Image: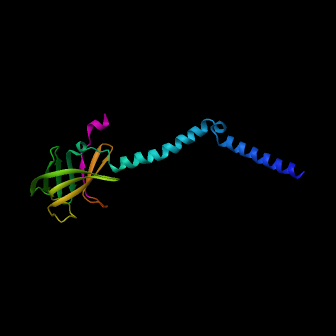
Amino acid sequence: MVLQQSWNRRAKWRRVAVVAREFMSVRAFGWCSNVAIALLWAIPLTLVVIAVHGSGWLLAQSRVVGEYSAEHDNGLEQLELHADGTYVQRYQRRGGALQLETNGKWEFKRRLFARPLVVLHDFTPHFPRHDGQTKRWELEVEEDFGMIRLYVDPKPPRDIYVGSPDPSYYK
């Protein structure tokens, strides 16, 4: 009698194990488990794509070349980045009294998990909150729906140069 009860318990647990195995297999869920497996891959892959795109890693140096402008309390600034690594900065004080034009060199730097930089050598921004020192400035680059912005300040409130949108982006 004791032997029979022990045998029945073992058989019962074997049946439970077989049912659990069938429940976890593809046969039990059919297409649902394939969808679940696809979602398990899709979610991390989507996060990686968003992180790479948000960091600007895919932004090419040729996309940064162009004209940028900033209008602020001190006046109007225009910045032209040329493909040969030179820039031209034009500044006109509010009221039109003073107009400056300076030239210099620039370079494009990629950073891992951060926005790329445009490094302007011997540059003087004329924004109200800056001291007007001529030095090496690192401007963060951001692309948003074809519009490229160059950020002078790393933290808000930010002074920015806004570029004209790329017409090929909208085709």
Q: Which residues are magenta?
A: 159-171
Q: Residue furthest right?
A: 1
* Residue closer to the observer: 16 or 150: 16
For the residue pair 121 and 27, the one nearer the viewer reads as 27
Q: Residue at x 20, y 63 (%)?
A: 128
Q: Quadrant of residue 165?
A: top left
x then y, percent, for residue 148:
27, 47
Name the colouring of the figure: rainbow
Name the residue furthest bottom: 131
* 30 sits left or right of 146 in the view: right
Q: Quadrant of the C terminus?
A: top left
Q: Is 160 on the left or on the right of 134, as rendered? A: right
Let me know if residue 147 is in the magenta part: no
Q: Position of residue 104 (x, y in %)?
A: 12, 53
Instruction: Say which residue appears at 63% left-offset and 38% top-offset.
Output: 26
* x and y percentages locating residue 124 in the rendered image: 15, 59
Q: Is residue 87 left or right of residue 165?
A: left
Q: Is residue 118 left or right of residue 87?
A: right
Residue pictured at 23% horizontal, 57% vertical:
138
| Total marks in image | 0
Q: Is residue 35 above or below residue 75?
A: above
Which of 142 and 58 lies nearest the eye of the viewer?
58
Residue most extreme to the front: 3
Residue 168 magenta: yes
Q: Position of residue 60 (x, y in %)?
A: 27, 43
